[in-house]
Image: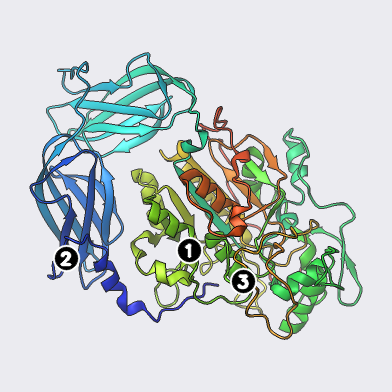
Amino acid sequence: MFARSWTKLAIVVLASASAALAQCAMNAAQPTVTICSPAKSSTVSDPVHFVALTNSVTTVTSMDILVDNVVVYHVAANKVDTTMTLQPGARHILVRGKNTAGTTFWKSEDITVSGSQPPPDCALNTAQPSVTICSPSKSATVADPVSFVADTNSATAVNSMDILVDNAVVYHVAANRVNTSLTLAPGARHILIRGKNAAGTTFWKSEDITVTVNATGLSQLQHIIWMFQENRSFDHYFGHMNDYRTSIGLPADVDGTPANASNASTDGTVFTPFHLATSCMEDLTPGWTESHRDFNLQSPTSETPAMDGFVWDAAHQAQYSGFHDTEGQRAMGYYTSDDLPYYHFMASQFAMSDRWFSPVSTNSPDNRLYGLAATSQGYVHKPGQLTAKTIFEELENAGVSWKVYYSDKESDGEPATSMNNFWGFTQNHLDKIVPISQYFTDLQNGTLPSVAFIEAGTLSGRDEHPGTADPSSTTSGTQIQVGAAYVASIINALMQSTSWRSSAFILAYDEAGGFYDHVPPMLGVPNPDGIAPKDLTSGDTPGDFTRTGFRVPMMVVSPFSKMNYVSHTPADHTAILKLIETRFNLPALTQRDAGQMDMTEFFDFANPPWLSPPNPPVQPTDLACHNNYLP
């Protein structure tokens, strides 16, 4: 699934060293920590920028920043690059690392922090322990985002502070002072700021304020996360969404599978859609030539959609590969809310699209490249190394935080990620390509980056891809419910975190996987960069990058998602890039993302519907897995 080149792997250590500030020579001893910023004995203004590097033969698993002997920052990486608010005055700093050998090593220094003291009219409460809220003022009307400044007075050291808005925790910091800005929903808000000291005592102060609407609503999105699962078409997953929507009192406004849908096999047998009773099935073939035949079996190079080749190609694939389903009936199978209750609930409660397409008519790797760089630079088959900019390079250049969270590792122990196809950039930013466990840690610690991409569990059976590594087995396979439960764990963790109120999670599928869909792809879309397909073989269907792939399931889960919303605006994965570019004022990567909608139609920033998220159903994983026959 993930193509890459490791020919330059030997320079990784040098690349990490070069990331240090020019005036910061890394200590050659091993293992060591080098603090590049702030400088020893310096006076720095608040907030304080920390940059620290490690030198260790054994892999560094984590780094911590301690201020006055209290841990205030933790990251599962071999480098620190973060900005934090510190209390003004003399501060003792210690940065420590820990490697896989269990060795802990550190560097310490003393600095002086200048910066904002509590406002002059904010007298610290002399009671102990107590919290004093300096900003916002009691009963004040304030514009969003809201600036919070609060201090504590406690004889016992204060370990942490929380901000609660309407009784929900929205911010947590391992410090004795709060100085931050948060996006809050407009209207009357109840604020409570509490501290907890080393003695285990919890103490707080509360007040009521009124928040006015932020005129630049998109700026309320402080975190944009997106994820692509594998190889499912819209009709295959959501073709019967209207049955579910009407059952819960919503209008039937999704363009689902028509009653007269059908496709013929290689022997002329006609198949109609049917409800699958298995969570596993034999693979289909969504490659370049097959996708063009699915579009129009008799005239795949034409611009006239027939949408009649899905069963034929599935049958041909089975006959060629020795599969069981030699008639290709599986291409017409579908699932319902009984099988995927979590997806149906989330897509209907939040926002979804019934005109969301994969970017290119071929299989997964190239569509995933479009989802990161808005181009495959001419590849339609297995891609090689690309020189195109990704959205992450633009974010890096703009100083916007980002991470790629990977779900699996390759057989050689390296991360399974499409970013390996952009090795020229990736090799210098390996500290931002981290395991999915770090995502859950970042949610817990309030350190989620501004932009994040989550790689599917492609090598661990959690990506919903059809097929199995063992074609002879009738009980093994990639179970869609296992993949759906994995996605549910990721989204649920976000909804339960302090980052929820300023986030948007976008779930889509990299391409349709060869499953039937009745809606034709978008035609006449811009070729991203003027590069024609460069790896077509003599047996491939001629074509260009001016046609998208087929429809795929898609949803936007956010406190700002319009309730029960269905978008009918045609778009492909590069619209996610357009949203990020619009939010952070970045240029378009190619002509493809430049021509996309910016996705703001999915959101209501003036009256966020889901500040308190719903309680979704548990996604079951008990559907039978019959990989080699259809019930």
* Residue in the image at 16% along x and 18% along y: 127
Kind of residue sitting beneath label 1: Lys
- Toward the viewer: 193 or 583? 583
SS assignment at label 1: loop
Residue on which the image places disc 1: 389
The quadrant the N terminus occupies is bottom right
User: Residue 279: x and y, percent?
Assistant: 67, 62
Residue 631 in view, yes or no: no
Which corner quadrant of the image does residue 130 belong to? top left
Left or right: residue 390 compared with residue 162: right
Q: CA distance from mark 1 to mark 3?
A: 15 Å
Q: Nearer the viewer, mark 2 or mark 1?
A: 1
Kind of residue sitting beneath label 2: Met
Left or right: residue 12 compared with residue 603: left
- Toward the viewer: 69 or 626? 69
CB within 8 Å, label 1 to label 3: no
* Residue in the image at 70% along x and 41% along y: 566
Q: Residues within 10 Å of mark 2 (few under 14, many from 20)?
A: some
User: Residue 618: x and y, percent?
Assistant: 57, 46
Left or right: residue 121 compared with residue 321: left
Q: Residues within 10 Å of mark 3 (few under 14, many from 20)?
A: some
Q: CA distance from mark 3 to mark 2?
A: 43 Å
Q: Nearer the viewer, mark 3 or mark 2?
A: 3
User: Residue 584: x and y, percent?
Assistant: 46, 46
The quadrant the C terminus occupies is bottom right
SS assignment at label 3: loop
Residue 454 in view, yes or no: yes
Q: CA distance from mark 2 to mark 1?
A: 29 Å
Q: Residues within 10 Å of mark 1 (few under 14, many from 20)?
A: some
The mark that comes first in sequence, 2 or 1, is 2
